[in-house]
Image (cartoon, rainbow, N blue to C red):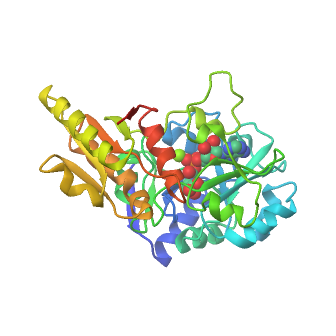
Amino acid sequence: MRTECVPVSAASLSRAASLLRAGEVVAFPTETVYGLGADALQPQAVLRIFKAKERPADNPLIAHIADRDMLPLLAASVPDIAVRLMDAFWPGPLTLILPKTQAVPDGVSAGLSTVAVRMPSHPAARALIREVGSPIAAPSANRSGSPSPTTAAHVMADLEGRIPMILDGGPCDVGLESTVLDLTGGIPTVLRPGGVTVEMLRTVVPDVRVDEAVLRPLQQDAQVRSPGLKHRHYAPKAHVTIVAGAPQDVVARAVYLYDEAKAKGQSPALLCAAAHVSAYGDRHIHVLGGSPEEMSAHLYDALRTLDDEGTDLILAEVTGTDGIGLALMNRLLRAANFDVVDA
Ligand code: TXA
Ligand code: MG
């Protein structure tokens, strides 16, 4: 199959919408990462997503809507708390887990009794959903297991020849996937941190809690609330080690590990904050940015770029867990398979 990669325009949006109505899959930009979409109400179309991505069948998808009118198609009931969260954070990077209707195909919910719903803020994503006239199921548009795509080129690298079309809307703003908040289990629980931070959620839901698995490996016998948590995620080909501790210790330890790897004939690289650049001398560094927001926006591109450069060891500086930092650290920990060295 030839994969066409075209800039977002009225014409390309309308062709993408025709493909989606016909039961095909199309990759499109959102404010978080690129999604691989299919009409959420066509079971056969949804299965094509799993095939193109080689996604495990037990990992459910997020259904994207453009207007709240579409919500009753998906959610069997919408608690008050959900309405208040939608008022505050939709459209935007917040996914809500709600009880599902019969209309939601098993492929979308992976057999669960719940459905994940989000209203993206990206204008192209919303225009596409409106033009299709149906919710769009979309996971991130990467091959399962590799970092999520934040540019059309990333999608092309992973899915060329497997999907008919990519809508190119430039680089994504947030760069990390949406916050996933479970509203079906008593206390509202963050299953995956993202652009709508825990601090922001607390302004509306003071008692929100963060699932243990966000910063820790899953216990073998733990009940998995979000099936996505148990699959290795966001991982480049290179081995990733996180160096944790006080800033000056982190730099010293990272330098030590870098030089040790180099002496063994490896190709290490340092993933660091802008403030630390000078401390690393002429070693191979990749700067994520100055602020946590900038670092989040660049993380996945950095992991892919370092892979393309043939890096085999990525030494990543630990980050704070305030605000978007929690999402950044969550993704880094998974990319590193929880390999953390204490400086
Ligand atoms: O920002 C995003 O959310 C992007 C863009 C494209 O919107 N999408 C995305 O989809 O990241 P995906 O499939 O890569 O991640 C969806 C996450 C997975 O961790 C999945 O397990 C979880 O949401 N999820 C989906 N439905 C669920 C459900 N009913 N209950 C619990 N977790 C669910
Ligand atoms: Mg994903």
The x and y percentages for residue 7 are: 40, 70
Does 85 appear above or below 266? below
- Give the image quarter of residue 108: top right
Query: Residue, x 49% and y 55% (percent of image)?
Result: 325
Q: Is residue 306 left or right of residue 209?
A: left
Name the quadrant of the C terminus: top left
Look at the image and tell me whether residue 298 can be seen: yes
Does 323 appear above or below 268? below
Q: Is residue 187 left or right of residue 43?
A: right
Does 251 appear above or below 35? above
- Give the image quarter of residue 64: bottom right
Q: Is residue 130 left or right of residue 286?
A: right
Query: Residue, x 41% and y 31% (percent of image)?
Result: 339
The x and y percentages for residue 247 are: 34, 49
Which residue sits furthest top?
221
Q: Is residue 139 left or right of residue 149?
A: right
Q: Looking at this view, is 76 or 287 the one in front?
A: 287
The x and y percentages for residue 190 are: 67, 49
Query: Residue, x 32% and y 47% (percent of image)?
Result: 304
Q: Looking at this view, is 116 or 8 the one in front?
A: 116
Query: Residue, x 48% and y 75% (percent of image)?
Result: 11
